[in-house]
Image (tube, rainbow, N blue to C red):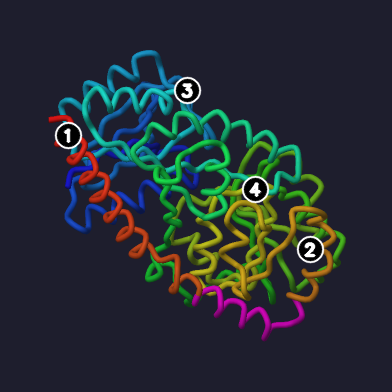
């Protein structure tokens, strides 16, 4: 099967990781993959995608959150698809105006169109940020109804989109998956490097919706002692604002963005506890990676993360009063080593049960076959 994958390769974010892991796995299973991605014409630092035929789509701006294509991007996309002649297009949506044109382009070319819809959400709409995110879902829903299938990560997200008018038969719940062989428990030297007896980790963007300041404030107020360290892995618009107030004098170490995957795995293997205090999420790949490495995990019930940790696979926080919850739990997780070890074992077991990359790709292949079969039946019906 020849899949034309439309996504992004930079800057680094969950969408980039998703595209890399899925397309590499499809190649490993013998499929042909063409990778169409956005690139600013002067940019030369995008990583290569081994095994994929690549097409660059011109854009004016791209960030971890959204993309602004140039005016000629749709023409380049249409011409490229005509030349590539794929069996199917899979768009890992990048919050771009081009997302809204895709159904029309693919209908004109008679190509089946599958999308993965990534935007984070809080199904309970408990805060201003979740209200803002609702607007994104309301904006996209009428267009998603014209895709052949839309992949989302949880039943909660499916129900949310159905309430906004997307037909249920268009929605497919296929959770993110993680390579459990690569992300696995193992030795790490980082604890000794940071002179830590207990190591707590946050990994992700330093942005408002990630609610990192609630974690930092709780840590600072908890007096965790010299033997406990908190690693902040990632960067974002709030980094410069927060760093002066939450520094090494409180046992907080800012590592910034870590590009090397092996180093990120070593960080997770060294961690005792992984914390995700987000107000909004989709299904966090960072959380799944930490769980797969056997780390005890705490996350809010934003998006699908609470669903991942339910029934004892981790500690689920409410997005209300995150600081006060963490202020209570951080010392407990510091002191109860056996409990954190047990939580890490349960987290790893949950990944093996539900969230492996292999399982994800198998479900994706079945979806592709189903969509192609449906398109053939439509053509027969027209004849």
Q: Where is residue 257 in the image (x, y as percent from the top left)?
A: 55, 48
Q: Mark 3 points at which residue?
A: 68
Q: Name the residue under label 1.
A: 379
Q: Give the range drawn in magenta.
A: 334-349
Whichever of labels 1 and 3 marks the residue nearer the N terminus, that label is: 3
For the residues labelled 1 and 4, the Cα–Cα distance comes to 38 Å
Q: In this orientation, which residue lies closer to the viewer: 10 or 378?
A: 378
Whichever of labels 1 and 4 marks the residue nearer the N terminus, that label is: 4
For the residues labelled 1 and 2, the Cα–Cα distance comes to 56 Å
Q: Name the residue under label 2.
A: 326
**Magenta stretch holds residue 170:** no
Q: Is residue 239 visible?
A: no
For the residues labelled 1 and 3, the Cα–Cα distance comes to 35 Å
For the residues labelled 2 and 3, the Cα–Cα distance comes to 38 Å
Whichever of labels 4 and 2 marks the residue nearer the N terminus, that label is: 4
Whichever of labels 1 and 2 marks the residue nearer the N terminus, that label is: 2
Q: In which quarter of the image is residue 219?
A: bottom right
For the residues labelled 4 and 2, the Cα–Cα distance comes to 22 Å
């Amino acid at each position: 099967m020849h899949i034309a994958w439309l996504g992004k390769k930079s800057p680094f974010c969950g969408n980039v990781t998703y595209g890399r892991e899925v397309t590499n796995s499809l190649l490993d299973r013998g499929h042909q993959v063409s990778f169409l991605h956005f690139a600013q014409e002067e940019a030369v630092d995008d990583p290569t995608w081994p095994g994929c035929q690549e097409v660059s789509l011109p854009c004016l701006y791209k960030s971890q959150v959204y993309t602004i294509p140039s005016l000629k991007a749709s023409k380049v996309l249409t011409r490229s698809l005509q030349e590539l002649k794929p069996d199917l297009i899979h768009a890992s949506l990048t919050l771009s105006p081009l997302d809204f044109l895709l159904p029309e382009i693919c209908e004109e070319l008679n190509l089946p169109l599958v999308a993965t819809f990534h935007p984070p959400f809080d199904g309970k709409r408990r805060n201003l940020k979740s209200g803002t995110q609702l607007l994104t879902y309301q904006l996209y829903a009428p267009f998603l109804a014209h895709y052949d299938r839309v992949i989302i990560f949880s039943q909660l997200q499916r129900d949310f989109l159905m309430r906004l008018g997307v037909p249920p038969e268009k929605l497919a719940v296929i959770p993110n998956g993680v390579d459990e062989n690569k992300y696995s428990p193992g030795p790490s030297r980082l604890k000794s490097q940071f002179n830590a007896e207990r190591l707590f980790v946050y990994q992700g963007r330093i942005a408002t919706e990630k609610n990192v300041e609630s974690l930092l404030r709780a840590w600072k107020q908890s007096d965790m002692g010299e033997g406990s360290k908190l690693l902040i892995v990632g960067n974002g618009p709030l980094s410069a604002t927060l760093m002066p107030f939450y520094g090494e004098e409180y046992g907080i170490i800012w590592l910034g963005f870590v590009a090397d995957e092996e180093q990120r795995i070593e960080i997770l293997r060294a961690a005792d506890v992984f914390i995700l205090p987000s107000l909004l999420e989709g299904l966090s790949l960072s959380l799944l990676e930490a769980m797969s490495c056997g780390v005890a995990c705490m996350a809010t019930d934003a998006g699908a993360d609470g669903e991942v940790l339910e029934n004892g696979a981790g500690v689920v926080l409410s997005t209300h009063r995150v600081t006060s919850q963490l202020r209570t739990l951080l010392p407990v997780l510091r002191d109860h080593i056996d409990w954190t070890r047990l939580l890490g074992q349960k987290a790893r077991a949950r990944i093996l049960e539900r969230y492996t990359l292999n399982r994800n790709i198998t479900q994706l292949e079945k979806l592709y076959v189903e969509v192609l079969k449906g398109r053939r039946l439509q053509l027969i019906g027209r004849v």
